[in-house]
Image (cartoon, rainbow, N blue to C red):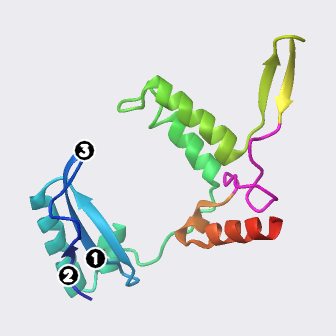
């Protein structure tokens, strides 16, 4: 393996949000990745730590943030994790939570497009409440891409997306 390198496009990269220092590197599976930093010092420091971890055969632990070489399997569905996050960390009443309008938007999008929940609409002319089918069907069904029922552990690889693409091709 080789040490992290400065990414193309100038160093620092000057975008509309300001300067960032971008490094390219190879992860523990030899895949090319990149990482951005707010300061040059942070980028250089991370590059030194990367090199030390690689020399000491601890690259996987350094990149994943764990000394345990095994990834813990988590069968929790994506929908449950998302709803927990919305109810705790992201809630506007919690410290560092989202703005109320942002939280409402995230909650609505998650409910309809990721979890695939139906919604109820109030019909003004007839004054009745009608349940509308989910915006999307579960992943794997014709035209479906809702991933709320998929266990988080399946996102360790791109297999979920490969299955979705295959399902879309089979539906056509």
Where residue 79 appears, as percent x and y from the top left, is 64, 48
Identify the residue shown where x is 66% and y is 44%. Answer: 113
Of the residues tagged 3 and 2, which is closer to the observer? 3
**Which image quarter is the N terminus in?**
bottom left
Left or right side of 107 for 136? right
Residue placed under numbered mark 2 in the picture: 3
Labelled pair 3, 1 in contact (Cβ < 8 Å): no
Mark 3 vs 2, N-terminal side: 2
User: Magenta stretch: residue 58 in it?
Assistant: no
Binning the other alpha carbons within 10 Å of mark 2 as few (below 14), some (14 to 19) or many (20 upward) gives: some
Residue placed under numbered mark 3 in the picture: 17
Identify the residue shown where x is 17% and y is 79%. Answer: 52
Labelled pair 2, 1 in contact (Cβ < 8 Å): yes
Mark 2 vs 1, N-terminal side: 2
Residue placed under numbered mark 1 in the picture: 25
* Quarter of the image where one finds residue 30: bottom left
* Quarter of the image where one finds residue 35: bottom left
Where residue 89 appears, as percent x and y from the top left, is 44, 37
Instruction: Out of 10 and 154, give the one closest to the viewer.
Output: 10
What element does badge 1 sit on?
strand
Magenta-drawn segment: 133-149
């Amino acid at each position: 393996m080789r040490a992290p390198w400065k990414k193309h496009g100038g160093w620092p990269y000057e975008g509309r949000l300001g300067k960032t220092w971008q490094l390219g590197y190879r992860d523990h599976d030899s895949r090319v990745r990149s990482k951005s930093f707010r300061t040059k010092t942070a980028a250089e420091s991370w590059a030194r730590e990367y090199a030390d971890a690689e020399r000491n055969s601890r690259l996987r632990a350094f990149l994943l943030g764990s000394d345990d070489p095994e990834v813990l399997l988590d069968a929790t569905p994506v929908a449950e994790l998302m709803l927990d996050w919305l109810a705790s960390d992201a809630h506007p009443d919690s410290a560092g939570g989202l703005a109320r309008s942002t939280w409402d938007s995230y909650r609505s999008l998650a409910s309809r497009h990721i979890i695939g929940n139906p919604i109820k609409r109030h019909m003004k002319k007839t004054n009745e409440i009608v349940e509308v089918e989910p915006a999307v069907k579960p992943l794997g069904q014709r035209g479906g891409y809702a991933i709320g029922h998929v266990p988080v552990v399946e996102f360790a690889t791109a297999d979920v997306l490969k299955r979705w693409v295959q399902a879309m091709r089979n539906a056509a």
